Image (cartoon, rainbow, N blue to C red):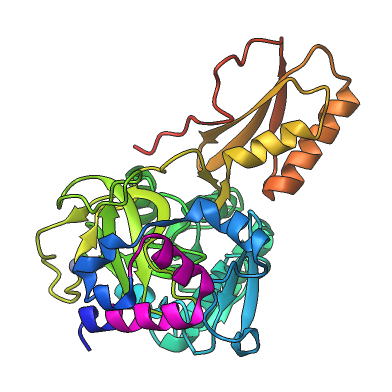
Amino acid sequence: MDLDSRVREVVAWAWERSPAFRRRMEEAGIAPAQIWGIQDLARIPLLKKGELAALQAQDPPFGGLLAVDMGELARIFVSPGPIFDPQGAGKDYWRRAQALEAAGFGPGDLVVNTFSYHLTPAGFMYDAGLRALGAVVVPTGVGNRELQVEVITRLGVTGFVGTPSFLGALLEVAREKGFDPEGFPVERALVSAEPLPPSLRTMFQEEWGIDTYQCYGTADVGTIGFECSRKDGLHLARDVVVQICDPATGEPLSPGEVGEVVVTLLNEVYPLIRFGTGDLSKLLEEPCPCGRWTSPRLAGFMGRVGDAVKVRGLFIHGHQVKALAGEFPWVKKLQVVVDREGVRDSLTLLVETEGASPGELETLKRRASELFRLKVDAIDTLAPGELEGAKPLEDRRRWD
Ligand SMILES: [Zn+2]
């Protein structure tokens, strides 16, 4: 079936089954019959990623967006926000196998899956894709670096999936332990959840012989794009329609313009239609010389709309920083600074206060780690007024 027919079908289905979608259509004065295909999607207002947490809180658990009975789900994940992410039935629900296949993974590969298997869905996304391809998974999850390096060398693991920073961290441990890069068994890696700096990709290839590819997706919609052998942009995955839109108006932009990645998920479980991911990118017009994949390509991650930033694979939202500051009366103002030391993102809290005890600062730091589900590296105090006009979140990382 062509994409226009599938768009018609998913819109009609969501109209019937998803009260939140029907409300969005009605408020905009549109009926399903007016959506003939991709061209007409722009008439439907955006559903912003940043609205999901509030929508789900108002109408638990899925904000009126789930279009099947809850009993038909396989799993429910909890992403920061909190946002509940449903997993429907099926072998490769998030369509991750195509990204793995494009990266050269196949039957018989032995792969460490270093994404977490609890709360957020990344671990299961890769697990399902790898199993669908016939690869063998070693579900190592996050952390335990020394053990992971031992497992990789003793089992002769051929593949890695995880964040690029974590691959960098494992290779650092391997080097410290005196492993010979020539004899290191990992041949290929598929990374996601954060940008892959070109310098890091070159280091993986040249020093360790690891051929590294990128995949792009979200916890809500699964796989959106993936790199092919040319490693020049991300081919759009199956079952998604991607538009690059003006983040303010939702209007699709001309080809080549940078805008928000807006996804329509052709899925009957969780039919997210005109879902604004908050990620910025652009579409590449020229066909890919690879010849293997024919879908259009996204240029890759070009930043975030608004105030959320992704740190070590998890989003921190500006509203979370404000809420955190509100929990401590002695905090006049709070800013979270994200920076990068080597291959690792660092998180620093800057606190405006008239005087806080070391114990109070430690409590704030601990609470921040708990709320963001990320380790906070440092906390610094500033005199009142020093954060005048500062954003709640400051991203100082550079990706070149
Ligand atoms: Zn290609």
Foreground of the two, 167 or 9: 9
Residue 191 lies, with reference to residue 323, above or below; the image says below
Whether residue 144 appears in magenta in the rendering, the answer is no
Q: Give the extent of the magenta segment.
A: 7-30
Q: Position of residue 360 (x, y in %)?
A: 87, 27
Foreground of the two, 297 or 253: 253
Whether residue 15 appears in magenta in the rendering, the answer is yes
Q: Main secondary structure of the magenta part?
A: helix
Question: Residue at the location (27% across, 60% down)?
Answer: 243
Left or right, residue 394 beside residue 250? right
Left or right, residue 168 beside residue 1? right
Q: Position of residue 42 (x, y in %)?
A: 27, 60
Q: Quadrant of residue 87?
A: bottom right
Question: Residue at the location (54% across, 83% down)?
Answer: 88
Question: Residue at the location (49% across, 86% down)?
Answer: 131
Q: Is residue 153 visible?
A: no
Question: Residue at the location (83% across, 26% down)?
Answer: 329
Q: Quadrant of residue 363?
A: top right
- Check the picture and name the quadrant holding the C terminus: top left
Q: Position of residue 15 (x, y in %)?
A: 42, 78
